[in-house]
Amino acid sequence: MLSGYTIQPVTAMRNHPELAPDTAGLYALLLDHPDAIRPSLEAASLRLDGLRLGKRPVLYIGATSDSLRRRLKTHTSHDTCRSTFRMSLGAVLAEQLHLVAQPVVGQPYFGFNSFSEAKLSAWIDGHVSIAFRADPASMVLERDLIASGDPLLNIAGRHKRPGASQILELRKQCKGLRLDRGILH
C-alpha cells in the first residue's frame, strides 16, 4: 500500500507547492532522523514501532478528497492551529524544544507563539520529509493504513491505542488543560 510515492523534504514542498498535484491523494509525513525525537518519546513513554516507508518511520498519514497541494501547504505552514500533524508533533516536542503554547479559547486546537512556531518549523525542516501520491481512493486507503500501521501522530482511527491517548494528553497540556501524568507512564 505504501508504494508509488514521490518523496520530498518539507522545505521543498513549502517553497514549491506545485510539486504536489492539485488532486485527491494520500500523503505521509516521514521522520528522517529518528534519534532527533527520541528524548521526547522516552519522556512520554512513546515508541516509533509503526509503519515505515523504506527505513523512515511514518509519523502521520493523511488524505484529501480534493487537493493534495492545498493540504500539504497546511502542514508546511508556520501555523500550528491549522494542522493536526503540527499540533501533535509540537505537543510531543514542547518540552525538548521549549515551545510556548498558546491555547485558543473556546476552540479544540492551539498554536505556539511566533518564536516557538519558528523553532517547530525549523525542527520539521531538518527532520521530516513528505511522501505523496495522487489517488482517487485516498480516503479509504488512509483509514486502512492508519488502522494497520499505527502512525505515531495520528489520532483519528487510533483513539483506543495507548500512543494516541498519550498524544491527546500532551495536546491537552498545550491547550492549558490538566495533564493526567498517569497516562504518560
Image (cartoon, helix red, strand yellow):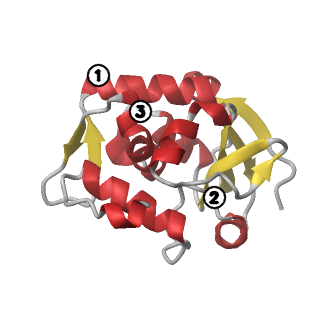
Left or right: where 36 falls relative to 137: left
* Residue, disc 2: 151
**Label 2 neighbour load within 10 Å: few <14, some 14-19, many 20+:** many
User: Which residue appears at 52% of the width and 63% of the height?
Assistant: 163
Give me the C-alpha separation between circle 1 and circle 3: 15 Å
Q: Which of marks 2 and 3 is nearer the N terminus?
A: 3
Q: Position of residue 182 (x, y in %)?
A: 35, 66
- Residue 39 x %, y %: 52, 37
Label 1 with label 3: CB-CB less than 8 Å = no
Task: From this view, report whether residue 122 is shown above or below residue 174.
Answer: above
Looking at the rendered structure, the kind of residue marked 3 is Gln
Tell me if I can see residue 91 in this picture. yes
Which residue carries the number 3 mark? 96
Count residues near mark 1 (Cα–Cα under 10 Å), then give few for <14, some for 14-19, many for 20+: few
Identify the secondary structure beneath mark 3: helix
Q: Is mark 1 on a helix, strand or loop?
A: helix
